[in-house]
Image: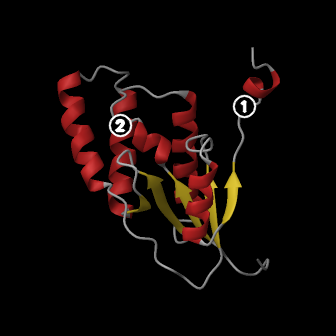
Amino acid sequence: MGADVAAEVVLDLSRLLSRVLHPTPTGVDRVEMAYARGLLETIPDRLCFAAVHPSGLYGRLPRGEVLRFLDETEHRWQAHGRSIARSMRPFAARTLLRLLPRPVRRKDMPRLYVQASPNNLIKPDLVRAILRREQARFVCLVHDLIPIQYPE
């Protein structure tokens, strides 16, 4: 990839999508959200979103629906888990329907596939299949080495 060619960046939101029924975030959830917000701010014209949906399907996520999902998720987190279970289920159902993955379209530009959470990393065949489908180079972010350094 040449230094003068801007790559399309595909941010994987599998972790956040998998946590749609959880009213409060973990540290990993916050990290994935921070990358989504940061990349939206710095490279909005080159950023797109994808996920392995809880249904098992992989694909691109519609940008408008992702933005709505990010806003609603942050709002839920700010409520500090005061949401009641009855309101969580309809929210999750609507979200999972709106964020059903779409097919990946080919482009004549380089792609970077960014995985900001450990979601799906224990499934190397799945990751290889995604990278093939995306025709992308893999950027995997490591935030915490404590489990590796101190597995006990």
* Residue 90: image location, x then y, percent: 18, 37
| Disc 1 secondary structure class | loop
Crowding at mark 1 (Cα within 10 Å: few <14, some 14-19, many 20+): few
| Disc 2 secondary structure class | loop
The relative height of residue 75 versus residue 79 in the rendered view (above or below) is below
Residue 41: image quadrant is: bottom right
Residue 149: image quadrant is: top right
Instruction: Give the left or right position of residue 11, taking residue 72 as reference.
Output: right
- What residue is drawn where x is 35% and y is 37%? 20
Crowding at mark 2 (Cα within 10 Å: few <14, some 14-19, many 20+): many
Q: Which mark is residue 128?
A: none
- What residue is drawn where x is 75% and y is 20%? 151
Quickly name the residue at label 2.
Answer: 20
- What residue is drawn where x is 32% and y is 42%? 72
* Residue 28: image location, x then y, percent: 57, 33
Which amino acid, by three-letter code, is at mark 1? Asp
Camera-side residue of 128 and 90: 128
Camera-side residue of 110 and 33: 110
Quickly name the residue at label 1.
Answer: 144
How many angstroms separate mark 1 from mark 2 (CA)? 23 Å
The residue furthest right is 149
Residue 59: image quadrant is: bottom left
Q: Quadrant of the N terminus?
A: bottom right
* Residue 135: image location, x then y, percent: 61, 72
Camera-side residue of 54 and 64: 54
Q: First in sequence, mark 1 or 2: give its number.
A: 2
Q: Quadrant of the C terminus?
A: top right
* Residue 123: image location, x then y, percent: 59, 46
